[in-house]
Image (cartoon, rainbow, N blue to C red):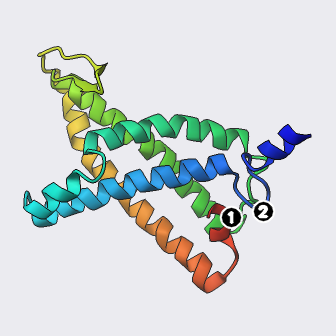
Amino acid sequence: MMLEGATNGLRDKPLRYGLVSRFFHWMTAYLLLWQFCMTIGWRMFGDNKIMQVASVLGPSHKVVGILVLTLVIPRFLWALSNRHQSPVADISLLGRFAKTVYTLFYILMFIVPVLALLRAYGSGQGYALWGLHLVPKTDHIIPWLRTPADRLHTPLAWTLSCLIAGHILMAIFHSVIRRDGTMSRMI
């Protein structure tokens, strides 16, 4: 009985997301918002003191990509295992659109970092993180692998950022205009 009560808060329920879903959501949100804020900052301000200081306050671009990739698979599996307990989905046109956007979130959170890893392999540079060789260094350029990764990584990342901005705006809309408790299920 004690174990059942302790795990009830972990799993999703029809009126509220569980602790695990909320952890995955907010950890991914932090990582992606950090990534896009830093990217925008570097593009707007360039390599100045402010951006140099800000960049040491959080994970690097490549680390964020690996962490997002590391989170997206268990996050997807967790969402799949909770699909019958999760808060009821809106079946309106807006609800179906939201479901499509969530599907795109998962696809892009997987594809964008994978493209970066393919680019590292295709450029022959490889990639190591914390002593782990995630992509072997070959010193051989593979154009058919590198070129698509070069061309798709950035536009798909910006597509993801636009979807995130829309997601944030819709969360505010649900909270302020509709007042339907959508945000309270995830907070």
**In the picture shown, does residue 4 fall above or below 130?**
below
**In the picture shown, does residue 3 fall above or below 139?**
below
* Residue on which the image places disc 2: 15
Task: Tell me: 28 left or right of 19.
Answer: left
* Residue on which the image places disc 1: 185
* Residue 129 disc label: none
Q: Quadrant of residue 127?
A: top left
Q: Residue at x 36, y 36 (%)?
A: 66
C-alpha distance separating marks 2 and 1: 7 Å
* Quarter of the image where the N terminus is located: top right
Q: Is residue 93 visible?
A: no
Q: Nearer the viewer, residue 168 or 108?
A: 168
Q: Earlier in the sequence, mark 2 or mark 1?
A: 2
Q: Are marks 2 and 1 in contact (CB under 8 Å)?
A: yes
Residue 13 x, y percent position in the rendering = 78, 54
Q: Residue at x 72, y 64 (%)?
A: 91
Q: Residue at x 21, y 58 (%)?
A: 54
The kind of secondary structure element at disc 2 is loop
Residue 157 x, y percent position in the rendering = 32, 50
Q: Residue at x 48, y 50 (%)?
A: 27
User: What amino acid type should be assigned to the residue bearing mark 1?
Assistant: Arg
Task: Tell me: 132 left or right of 20.
Answer: left
User: What amino acid type should be assigned to the residue bearing mark 2?
Assistant: Leu
Task: Tell me: 149 left or right of 26.
Answer: left
